[in-house]
């Protein structure tokens, strides 16, 4: 019965799209705080509908009648979902994020989707949040705030260390990583970096030393991750890399949770093999983040364990939530649609190398 209904809806969708060449956009995972920015950037150019639902194999049905969708990092654009979207008449996918590991790009291009992301929305927002995580974790800001709200003004458990003179390892010196390097250089830190190719302007400006990854792990007091999530980078930080680090090293992750082996991380934190972990992401955040679980709690035992550790600071994927970043994300979203509506390739188009291969 469900398949029959879908077939009817599919037929209606095809007829609708044949009559109307205008972009009709469905925004998945729409958050209350971002909707005003998206409406402002659209400026009534396109017909836009917002849904709080994340994209998955079931909610793909919501896309019937739309030829374009916008998705976020927690949405599922796996092959089976993409097939459904294509059958429902969707042809354009614009991501409100720079990362796109949640979208199977090869399948998307095989079907013929136009796909674009938001690569330069605000690298400063992410780098500044990484810095905030580092400072708050190192100087026990959250703990101190909790204590004084309970009228406890004891300082015995609030020891941190100066950033000045410390060695910071930047893994990935792209748009965000290079800004993080500049911020840490401003604190008077020595900067090590791991990436290919090296950023020679960054070398000159911040006296950055590019080094092999193992050496970076051994020498760094702080390691900040700024690389994309892909097959090669899965569990980039694993038991082996953690064993190389100082027992005082703080790891900062504002990229993707899957870059870090959570089980190995928990072991290293519990045994004081490293000093701490500050993160805005989590390996299995899809089913947990962006929702309020305060009444019923969570079932993820690894996340519970992480949150119970005193040397862990976790924020709910909020690094991008600044006025400037949300403005840029919204504008890029509709710039992508503008290009497609004019029959052009977006400057942020993904998968072009697959089409040319």
Image (cartoon, grey):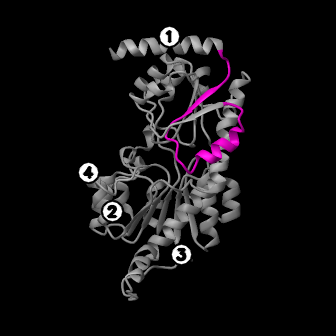
Q: Nearer the viewer, mark 4 or mark 2?
A: 4
Q: Mark 3 points at which residue?
A: 163
Q: Quadrant of the N terminus?
A: top left
Secondary element type, mark 1: helix
Q: Name the residue under label 2.
A: 307
Residue at 57%, 10% in the rendered image:
15
User: Who comes first in sequence, dot 4 or dot 3?
Assistant: 3
| Separation of marks 2 and 3 at Cα, in angstroms | 25 Å
User: What is the x, y in percent for residue 97?
Assistant: 56, 43
Depth order, front residue of 272/83: 83
Magenta-highlighted residues: 20-46
Residue at 44%, 56% in the rendered image:
316
Q: Which of marks 1 and 3 is in front?
A: 1
Q: Which mark is residue 299?
A: 4
| Separation of marks 4 and 1 at Cα, in angstroms | 41 Å
Q: Mark 1 points at which residue?
A: 11
Depth order, front residue of 112/249: 112
User: Who comes first in sequence, dot 2 or dot 3?
Assistant: 3
| Separation of marks 4 and 2 at Cα, in angstroms | 13 Å
Depth order, front residue of 238/128: 128
User: Who comes first in sequence, dot 4 or dot 2?
Assistant: 4
Local packing at callout 2 (Cα closer than 10 Å; few below 14, some 14-19, many 20+) is few
**Can residue 120 be seen by looking at this rendering?**
no
Residue at 42%, 68% in the rendered image:
249
Q: Nearer the viewer, mark 2 or mark 3?
A: 2
Q: Which of marks 4 and 1 is in front?
A: 1
* Residue 29 included in the magenta stretch of the image: yes
**Can residue 293 be seen by looking at this rendering?**
yes
Q: Do the residues labelled 4 and 1 touch (CB within 8 Å)?
A: no
> Is 26 situated above or below 357?
below
């Amino acid at each position: 019965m469900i398949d029959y209904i879908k077939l009817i809806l599919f037929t209606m969708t095809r007829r609708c799209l044949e009559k109307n060449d205008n972009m009709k956009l469905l925004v998945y995972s729409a958050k209350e705080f971002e909707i005003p920015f998206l409406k402002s950037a659209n400026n009534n150019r396109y017909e836009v509908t917002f849904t709080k639902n994340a994209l998955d194999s079931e909610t793909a049905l919501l896309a019937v009648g739309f030829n374009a969708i916008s998705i976020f990092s927690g949405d599922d654009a796996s092959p089976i979902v993409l097939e459904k979207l294509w059958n429902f008449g969707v042809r354009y996918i614009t991501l409100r994020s720079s990362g796109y590991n949640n979208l199977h790009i090869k399948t998307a291009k095989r079907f013929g989707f136009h796909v674009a992301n938001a690569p330069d929305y605000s690298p400063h927002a992410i780098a500044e949040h990484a810095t905030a995580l580092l400072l708050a974790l190192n100087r026990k800001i959250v703990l101190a705030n909790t204590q004084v709200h309970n009228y406890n003004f004891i300082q015995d458990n609030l020891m941190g260390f100066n950033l000045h003179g410390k060695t910071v390892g930047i893994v990935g010196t792209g748009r965000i990583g290079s800004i993080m390097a500049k911020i840490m250089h401003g604190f008077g830190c020595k900067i090590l970096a791991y990436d290919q190719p090296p950023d020679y302007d960054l070398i000159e400006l911040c006296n950055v030393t590019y080094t092999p990854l193992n050496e970076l792990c051994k020498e760094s007091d702080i390691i900040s991750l700024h690389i994309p999530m892909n097959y090669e980078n899965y569990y980039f930080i694993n038991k082996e890399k953690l064993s190389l680090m100082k027992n005082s090293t703080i790891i900062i992750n504002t990229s993707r949770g899957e870059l870090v082996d959570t089980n190995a991380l928990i072991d290293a934190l519990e045994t004081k093999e490293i000093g701490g972990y500050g993160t805005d992401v989590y390996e299995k955040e899809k089913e947990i983040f962006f929702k309020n679980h305060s009444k019923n709690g969570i079932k993820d035992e690894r996340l519970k364990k992480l949150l119970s550790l005193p040397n862990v600071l976790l924020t709910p994927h909020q690094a991008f939530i600044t006025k400037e970043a949300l403005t840029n994300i919204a504008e890029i979203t509709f710039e992508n649609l503008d290009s497609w509506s004019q029959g052009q390739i977006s400057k942020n188009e993904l998968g072009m190398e697959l089409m040319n291969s």
